[in-house]
Amino acid sequence: QLLLRLGWWLGFVVTFGLGVIVALRWSARHRPSAAAAAESWVPWIAEQLAKGVSEEEVKRSLKESLPEANKSGVGRAAELEQLLKMARPAPLPEGWAEQTDPASGSQYYHNELRRQSTWLR
């Protein structure tokens, strides 16, 4: 009976150890790159800018939240600037202007030449 218990525990420890090794290797292979992890912040940045939060405030939040990833100060600043650039809305096409609906206060877009308006950017 002692050998049976010993065998059971040995099997348990070996199986558990292999499970941990497999999990760690899988995690290392499927971990997103630092660039992909940083790009996942773009929707949040765009939302903050749309709310009227200043770019400096957004940069400050990002510096606190994003991992350093062994970057120098210059590389870090360039990365933050690139993220802000990706989050900024593209300029409106020629002839289109952003307007505010007086009744609702919502933004809409108007093209005077075509006499068209739309709520969608």
Image (cartoon, rainbow, N blue to C red):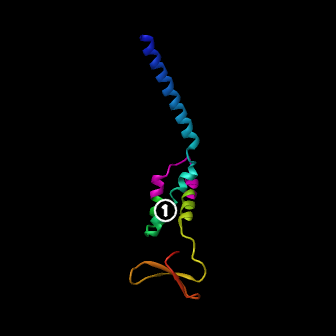
Residue at point 59%, 88% (across, down) = 113
Where residue 23 sits in the image (x, y, percent)?
52, 35
The quadrant where residue 90 appears: bottom right
* Residue 111 position (above or below residue 84): below
Magenta-colored segment: predominant secondary structure: helix
Where residue 71 sits in the image (x, y, percent)?
56, 49
* Residue 25 position (above or below residue 66): above
* Residue 118 position (above or below residue 85): below
Residue placed under numbered mark 1 in the picture: 45
Where residue 73 sits in the image (x, y, percent)?
55, 53
The magenta stretch spans which residues? Answer: 61-78
Residue at point 53%, 51% (across, down) = 37
Q: In front here: 110 or 9?
A: 9
Quick one: SS at disc 1? helix
- Disc 1 crowd rating (10 Å Cα; few below 14, some 14-19, many 20+) is many
Identity of the amino acid at label 1?
Ile
The quadrant where residue 39 appears: bottom right
Q: Magenta span has 67?
A: yes
Left or right, 96 with respect to 13, comes to: right
Q: In front here: 39 or 19?
A: 19
